[in-house]
Image: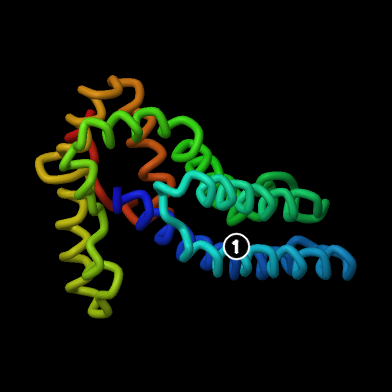
């Protein structure tokens, strides 16, 4: 289950972009000096969260729960500051934190039973699943990156979309639909340019 681990890390990379957007958005939202100071305090909470995300291993359920709780602490911190609105009303970047938290909730709370079934089944597809090969995340040349991303779009649900087949057979259509939705959300926009109509 390499995949969800990588997605959480990709998601936190995406959240670090959110971090910058929130700081800029707070200035534009007309926050008072006190609110701006509280926003900076939340920025530190977000920075800690991003730093600790590298210690995440999806099979460690205790650590995954801590990660989930930390994500909600970040969101709650920003939501307590009136000038920012609630859940991204005034700063859309905060919506992305909420999406990331909800996707993490899904992995921890809702997908756990299916994950256990796939592990018990010793699903090779699930065990080897690697939606974002390292060469994609480390590629610096834009043209090569685009080419690698195009290839990743075709294989992000395993060879011949085996994750779709495995999850449908083991856990049902409804679980597959939820998995697909949350997988894309947790990837933090990484697969926005992919055409997943083949999976409908």
Q: Quadrant of the C terminus?
A: top left
Q: Is residue 73 left or right of residue 98?
A: right
Q: Is residue 6 above or below residue 23?
A: above
Q: Residue at x 53, y 47 (%)?
A: 62
Residue 5: horizontal and vertical position, in percent? 38, 54
Q: Is residue 81 left or right of residue 95?
A: right
Determine the residue located farthest toward the front in the rendered image.
120
Front residue of this view, candidates 64 and 50: 64
Residue 102: horizontal and vertical position, in percent? 54, 40
To which quarter of the image does residue 11 belong? bottom left
Q: Residue at x 67, y 45 (%)?
A: 87
To which quarter of the image does residue 142 belong? bottom left
Front residue of this view, candidates 127 and 46: 127
Residue 198: horizontal and vertical position, in percent? 17, 35
Q: Secondary structure at mark 1?
A: helix
Reading the image, the residue beneath label 1 is 49
Colour logic? rainbow
Front residue of this view, candidates 84 and 107: 107
Residue 78: horizontal and vertical position, in percent? 73, 55
Q: Residue at x 65, y 55 (%)?
A: 91
What crowding class fits label 1: few (fewer than 14 Cα within 10 Å), some (14-19), or many (20 or more)?
some
Q: Residue at x 44, y 40 (%)?
A: 107
Q: Is residue 44 left or right of residue 199?
A: right
């Amino acid at each position: 289950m390499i995949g969800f681990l990588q997605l959480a890390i990709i998601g936190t990379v995406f959240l670090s972009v959110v971090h910058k957007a929130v700081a800029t958005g707070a200035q534009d939202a007309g926050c008072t000096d006190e609110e701006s100071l509280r926003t900076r305090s939340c920025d530190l909470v977000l920075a800690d969260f991003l730093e600790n995300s590298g210690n995440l291993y999806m099979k460690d359920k205790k650590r995954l729960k801590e990660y989930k709780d930390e994500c909600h602490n970040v969101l709650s911190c920003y939501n307590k500051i009136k000038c920012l609105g609630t859940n991204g009303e005034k700063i859309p970047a905060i919506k992305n934190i909420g999406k990331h938290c909800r996707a993490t909730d899904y992995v921890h709370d809702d997908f756990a039973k299916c994950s256990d079934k796939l592990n018990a089944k010793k699903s090779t597809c699930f065990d080897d699943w690697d939606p974002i090969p390292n060469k994609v995340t480390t590629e610096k040349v834009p043209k090569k990156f685009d080419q690698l991303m195009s290839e990743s779009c075709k294989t992000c649900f395993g060879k011949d979309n085996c994750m779709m087949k495995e999850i449908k057979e083991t856990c049902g259509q409804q679980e597959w639909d939820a998995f697909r939705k949350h997988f894309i959300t947790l990837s933090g926009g990484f697969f926005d340019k992919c055409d997943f109509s083949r999976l409908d």
